[in-house]
Image (cartoon, rainbow, N blue to C red):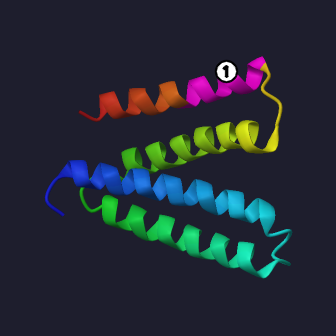
Amino acid sequence: MRSSSTAWWLLAASVLAEVLGTVALRHADGFTRFLPSLACAALYGLAIWLMSLSVRHLDLGLAYAVWAGAGTALTACVGIWLFGESMHAPRLLGIALIVAGVAVLNLSAR
């Protein structure tokens, strides 16, 4: 890996894999459906592997905070968008606070 920007791209790919794994988890129906279960396991494995590569060049606490926060916010947005989950003010406020918290952590790490 040549730079920390590559580490950030790996972390972003890890977040995306984790969110897609969570969508697959929803379709796995308690791991009773083979293909969604396989996709879930593969995507979660990929997410962890990409995260392990990114933390070689990023602070662990910062990387995990970004991964967890971005994953949570993006998963909530996917739930609203794909599955028609409610989009009420407290949920939107929660997503905004997650994004703000990750931004503050990122800025304070520099």
Q: Which residues are magenta?
A: 89-98
Q: Is residue 18 above or below residue 82?
A: below
In this rendering, would 88 be left or right of 66? right
Residue closer to the observer: 34 or 22: 34
Q: Residue at x 65, y 45 (%)?
A: 75
Quick check: is 95 in the magenta stretch? Answer: yes
Q: Picture coordinates of residue 68 (x, y %)?
A: 54, 47
Q: Main secondary structure of the magenta part?
A: helix
How many neighbours does mark 1 have within 10 angstroms: few (below 14), some (14-19), or many (20 or more)? few
Quick check: can you spot residue 59? no
Residue closer to the observer: 41 or 58: 41
Residue closer to the observer: 46 or 39: 39
Task: Provide the residue designation for mark 1.
Answer: 93
Q: Is residue 92 above or below residue 44?
A: above
Q: Is residue 15 above or below residue 84?
A: below
Amino acid under disc 1: Leu
Q: Picture coordinates of residue 3 (x, y %)?
A: 16, 53
Q: Picture coordinates of residue 52 (x, y %)?
A: 38, 66
Q: Which quarter of the figure has residue 30?
A: bottom right
Q: Quadrant of the C terminus?
A: top left
Quick check: can you spot residue 45? yes
Residue at the extreme left: 2
In this rendering, would 64 be left or right of 97? left
In this rendering, would 53 be left or right of 13? left
Q: Residue at x 66, y 70 (%)?
A: 40
Residue closer to the observer: 36 or 96: 36
Q: Picture coordinates of residue 64 (x, y %)?
A: 45, 50
Q: Which quarter of the figure has residue 29?
A: bottom right
In this rendering, would 45 be left or right of 54? right
Q: Residue at x 79, y 69 (%)?
A: 28
Q: Quadrant of the N terminus?
A: bottom left
Q: Residue at x 46, y 58 (%)?
A: 14
